[in-house]
Amino acid sequence: MKITSILSFLFLASLFISCKGEPKKDIEEKQVAQEPFTVVINMTAKEDDIMTLYYMDNTMDNFMEDVSIYKEVKKGDQEIVIALPEGYLPKSIRFDLSTKEPKFVKLIRSTFQMMDKVLTFLIRI
């Protein structure tokens, strides 16, 4: 009888000692910085110009001017890198290689990157 009383006392004491009523510390979630969706275009331009990249998500039916990115294009071979806004995953992408009247633009390669996924289109003529 004495042993069960002692064991019961120790059990209850361990409950009260281990649970002091302190609030549990929240575990901080480490947020991994998500890399933006990136478009890389390798091209040759005959003249200086401006290229436009249009993108849309599932909430849009058409490409819109206010959801576009403009990049300056210099004459000659170049690599143009365009990063979409952070956390944005497009449904569709369209790029206009020239804002002026049609000129010679040679598209060599276009690459689409998000995190560790890469999709590359190589144009062979």
Image (cartoon, rainbow, N blue to C red):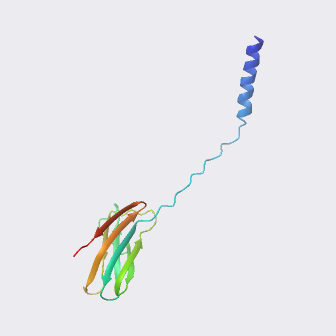
Quarter occupied by the N terminus: top right
Q: Relative to the observer, which residue lies in front, 62 or 34?
A: 34
> x and y percent of residue 17 in the render?
74, 32
Give coordinates of residue 23: x percent, y percent: 68, 42
* Residue drawn at the location 34% of the way across and 69% of the way down: 111
* Residue 8 image offset from top left, x and y in percent: 72, 19
Answer yes or no: is residue 55 visible: yes
Q: Is residue 49 visible?
A: no
Residue at the spot x=73%, y=28% of the render? 14
Question: For residue 49, which quarter of the picture?
Answer: bottom left
At horizontal 73% and vertical 19% (from top left) the residue drawn is 7
Q: Quadrant of the C terminus?
A: bottom left
Q: Residue 63 placed where, x, y %?
A: 31, 70
Farthest residue to the front: give it: 124
The correct choice, above or below, for 119 with respect to 77 in the image is above
Nearer-the-camera pick, 43 or 26 = 43
